[in-house]
Amino acid sequence: TYSTWPAGSNALWVVNAGAATLAQYKPSQLQQSGAPQATATIGTGSVSLAAALDAEGRIWVSNFLDATVAAYSPAQLVGGGTPTPVVTLSGSALNDARGLVFDANGNLWVAERSLGTVIEYSASQLVDGGNVTPNITLSGTAFNGPAGLAFDDSGNLWVTNSWGGTVVELTPDQLTASSTPTPAVTISNSAILAPMGIAFDVNGVMWLTNPSVPGNTIVGYTATQQNTGGDLAPAYTI
């Protein structure tokens, strides 16, 4: 459940890493192909690599160069420019933050690629931010360059390993405390040598982006394949 945005809703926000910006596109601009002008542009002042929206309408971004995760309020996002984040997370647990995702309780999960961890900041830690130690740190051989995060409808957390060429599933029971978990499911294949982004559609298909060899593809795994695991060719390739 999301709060009301000052300037409407259903806009698409795009992270532009090279330009260090967040760009907004309104629903009416998404009905056809083309090169529309962004309706709002936020300068993040860093190479931002991922974004996630919280229940208060704030957009959180992972910043590579300054090793932070920062939040912008709805009012700042409407105004454009280069605002100072309303909350900034920092500390030794952040070095190469990539994917971000919120769980059902408002806790923020971060894929920390170079450190090989998946960390969780509790909802209470997101109020003031600062140099804080994550509430939960998951580490171990399950992670090899973790980059993307997504929850499925059963509350399982899926992690793409951009250096390991795998996507792994962690069950809700494995997300309650710091540990070195053994994935409940691991999927690998020559089609996902360096998976990055991850998302589920309404039919439960898991979609992965692959920016390197074989490269420039988006692949999909069905719910049945997700239950099976192993070396699996994708059901769909774009």
Image (tube, grey):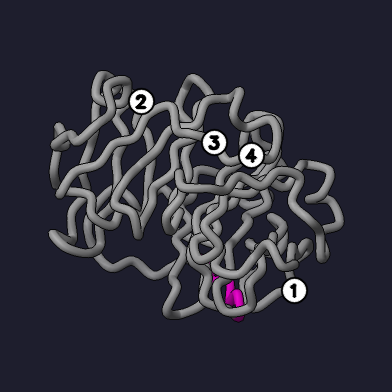
Tell me the distance, in whole angstroms, between the alpha carbons under discs 4 and 3. Answer: 6 Å
Tell me the distance, in whole angstroms, between the alpha carbons under discs 1 and 3. Answer: 37 Å
Q: Nearer the viewer, residue 178 or 58?
A: 178
Cβ–Cβ under 8 Å for marks 4 and 3: yes
Tell me the distance, in whole angstroms, between the alpha carbons under discs 2 and 4. Answer: 31 Å
Dot label at residue 179: 4
At label 1, which amino acid type do we have?
Thr
Identify the residue under disc 1.
84
Q: Is residue 100 left or right of residue 75?
A: left
- In the image, the segment drawn in magenta is 39-45
Identify the residue under disc 2.
202
Tell me the distance, in whole angstroms, between the alpha carbons under discs 2 and 1. Answer: 36 Å
Residue drawn at x 35%, y 42% is: 167
Q: Is residue 29 visible?
A: no
Residue drawn at x 65%, y 65% is: 94
**Could you tell which of marks 1 and 4 lies nearer the N-terminus?**
1
**In this rendering, the label closer to the viewer, 1 or 3:** 3
Q: Nearer the viewer, residue 11 or 83?
A: 83
Identify the residue under disc 3.
181
Q: Percent from the top left, x then y, of residue 186?
A: 34, 35
Residue drawn at x 37%, y 45% is: 198
Q: Secondary structure at mark 4?
A: loop
**In this rendering, the label closer to the viewer, 1 or 4:** 4
**Could you tell which of marks 2 and 1 lies nearer the N-terminus?**
1
Residue 115 magenta: no
